[in-house]
Amino acid sequence: MSYDEAKCSKRTGDKFAAINELAKRRGFFWSSFEIYGGTGGFVTYGPLGTRLKQNVETRIRELFVKKLGIFEMESSVITPSKVFEASGHVDHFKEPMVECQKCNTRFRADHLLEEKGVSSKEAEKMTLEEITQEIAIRNIVCPDCKGTFGKPQRYLTMFETTIGPYNGAVGYGRPEAAQNIFVEFNRLFNIAREKLPFGAIQIGHALRNEISPRQGLIRLREFTISDLEFFFDPEDQSCKFIKEVADEVLPILLGDTRLKECENVTLFTVREALDKKIILCEWQAFFMAMAKRLLVELGVPMEQQRFIEKLAWEKAHYSTQSFDQEVLVDRWGWVEVSGHAYRTDYDLTCHMKASGVDLRVYKEYPVPVEREEIVVKPVMTKFGPAFKGEASKVAVELAKIPVDKVIAEINKEGYIMIGNWQVLKEHIEISHQKTVERGTRFIPHVVEPSFGCDRLFYIALEYAFHVKDDRAILSFPRCITPIQVGIYPLMGKDGLDTKALELQKELTQAGFMTDYDETGSIGRRYARADEAGVALGITIDYDTLNDNTVTIRDRDSWQQVRVSIKELPQLLQEYFTGKINFESLGTLVQSK
């Protein structure tokens, strides 16, 4: 399927309301604080939602922590203000806001403009004056009460708090998890045995005081983020895994194409994207390929993914090159699910300057480098009589002046002024010295893949949702389905229920996530299971009591096979690890 075909086939209706209704009813998620009327931007995950979200996060850990050896860490959500002052967030983490003069509701001005046909890239780069003009020209009024808006202003979207009672230090709820990693760099580098490259990931809560969150799980005030910071030597950007992804195809919407108001993607292999300088860093390209694979695992085909190259005014203040990974969803169109930024040495440099702590690493040269340098030293036997008690101070100040400047001044004037002191040529000694450099210290560069876990959760839900014979089904991939096996006694009597409970206990102890249901007809139980995304349904019937076999029903095809209970744990293990398909579980007994 082409990208144009995918775009058209995806947006044929609005699944958003249906998914939200199912999510509330079956316990995936709902708005928090419902008994008090709810508060926008906060959600509660129910039992099924919690499992699904954990499974999505587990896939991230499988790809990056388990397979690549990335370190995982966990740190505080509340962060001292000086961290975000140093990183630039206090100055840059601001959005344009307008307030209704009638009902006092506040909205993000750029989002209001986008709803009226202004492109996102145009809205993002507008000044406050330009926003005012566009609101007036387009006659944009409050969506709630139709009132008019006041003048727009920049609003800091970080939650501010105090650390400690009364007049305590200012702190912020972290809007991302990256800065916690940067400030702990020295300890992480020690754990990495002082070797580059290495990476650290943090999956945890973050806070953004969104002005008017109106997109469900797509835009929350409290959310889960997965930030991965990968540190490497800028003089050696080679990725040791690049051959594994060299032929992986990346759908990229180039910046030049976006400037032409065109949404046509270009398909590049990873190798092509690097050779053509579309992507500047091998590690950046590698993590983009891994991000694409992650979304495929969550059920999103390549045709409904793309990476957009961020334009100059869209990039974060810390980024040299950025790509957003987007997925096509039914109501909102293209939605960002991960960001990929080449942050160079920006963050470590900022924190080193602000804290005074050296965050450089040492690299030994393969062969020591011998250099000859000119050295200027005070002749202390003449410094003492000339400057008396100030001699040491003058010597310290002399050492701060570049050697070439001292020599130039001495040769020109016969002296150099250091404050009020006149240092004559006879007061100093100029000599040549040979030095041997065995290495150098430098600040590592960083690439960052960052995933919004709540958005991945919603994407998994939407791409799993479909209707078959008027029945809603959540066809989750095996690796993330919240319930793997449903256990259903045909009747709740005659020992069938006892046998079913014994089987559930056995499968639970074998490590499978199970659910037991004996309420209602078997057809109703299948329907409930399909809505919950239960991958396989195992029915215990009267034949089970005779031959110790059970029927397994597939959620997606509704096919059924018969299998021996004795073989069940091993077969299920092979099925859920992708080693066998459904038909290999047993003997097909019916097609529906």
Image (cartoon, rainbow, N blue to C red):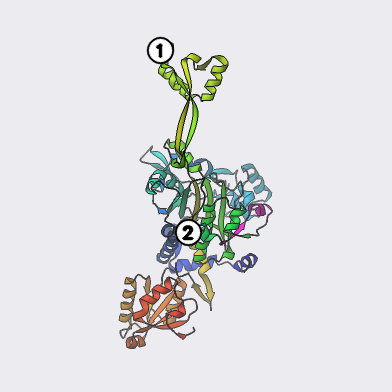
* Residue 214 visible: no
Report the side of 161 relative to 135 (left or right). left
Residue 251 part of the magenta-drawn span: yes
- The residue most toward the top is 385
Which residue is at a point 46% across and 23% down the rendered structure image?
Answer: 399
Which residue is at a point 45% across and 70% down the rendered structure image?
Answer: 478
Q: Mark 2 and mark 1: span between their CA atoms?
A: 70 Å
In the image, 320 versus 334, the foreground residue is: 320
Residue marked by disc 2: 454
In the image, 107 versus 539, the foreground residue is: 539
Report the side of 463 relative to 64 (left or right). right
Rendering coords of residue 458 (x, y %): 50, 62
| Amino acid type shown at disc 2 | Asp
Rendering coords of residue 92 (x, y %): 53, 43
* Quadrant in which the N terminus appears: bottom right
Residue 151 part of the magenta-drawn span: no
Q: Residues within 10 Å of mark 1 (few under 14, many from 20)?
A: few
**Local secondary structure at mark 2:** helix
Residue marked by disc 1: 388
Report the side of 378 relative to 337 (left or right). left
* Highlighted range, magenta: 247-261
Which residue is at a point 66% across and 45% down the rendered structure image?
Answer: 133
